Image: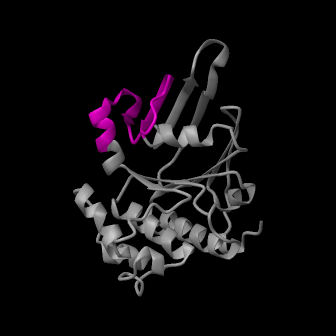
Amino acid sequence: MSFVEFKNVKKIYGSGEVEVRAANGLNFTMEEGEIVVVVGPSGSGKTTLLNMLGGMDNVTSGKIILDGNEITKYNERDLINYRRHDIGFVFQFYNLIQNLTALENVELANQLCDNALDAKKTLELVGLKKRMDNFPSQLSGGEQQRVSIARALAKNPKLLLCDEPTGALDYKTGKEVLKVLQDTALKHGKTVVIITHNSAFCDIANRVIRIRGGKVIEEKLNKKPVSAETLEW
């Protein structure tokens, strides 16, 4: 059994003539410790996929399995615990609490999870050892995104879900953030899923899942991922 499995997953909004099939029979797998890039154009179903895998949206039909557990059978209380303990989220916009320092933002994980990592050590992992006492307004966009990554990592999740994590960043800073995410998988064995419209990101992935119209049109393994530092787009 794979670490993550999607089995004929469908998500349908509305009904009749206004029915929208945001996911129209998704089938794919992911393995533990992989960097997985899910790529597709706007409206292809990428965010719906992420929301269902992250336990933020229920499926219409089909099964999603993570680490042997079928999350599509979870009730609302189970899903709250799943989001709290098993999933780390990194979004395009950083969602930091502005009146807390970088360290205090990351320490929030300790209040949510029993198995949280040390906040200071986690900030050091993402290169922010000297910025722990700064507030978000005193940090660059790239530094704020690193705090967001550290906050997600500090939960010690099974899965790190990243929705367009470089979308609000310039080219150079975007590459630096991708390198942090790549190191997270390579050095710490985390499964990292990056949702993007940018096909250039596929080169750093162990697994590439292309979707269009709510369906997987290609699932490809990459035997020789490149370093994020070498990406061009």
Q: Quadrant of residue 121?
A: bottom left
From the viewer's perspective, is residue 43 above or below residue 17? below
Q: Quadrant of residue 35?
A: bottom right
Q: Residue at x 68, y 76 (%)?
A: 172
From the viewer's perspective, is residue 162 above or below residue 183? above
> In the image, residue 30 lies at what x, y percent?
53, 45
Q: Residue at x 26, y 55 (%)?
A: 112
> In the image, residue 73 lies at what x, y percent?
36, 27
Apparent side of residue 115 relative to residue 18 in the rendered image (left or right): left
Q: Quadrant of the C terminus?
A: bottom right
Apparent side of residue 13 relative to residue 40 in the rendered image (left or right): left
Colour scheme of the picture? one colour
- Residue farthest toward the bottom in the current orientation of the protein: 130
- Residue 218 appearing in the image: yes
The span picked out in magenta is 55-81
Does the magenta segment cover residue 79?
A: yes
Q: Residue at x 30, y 61 (%)?
A: 109
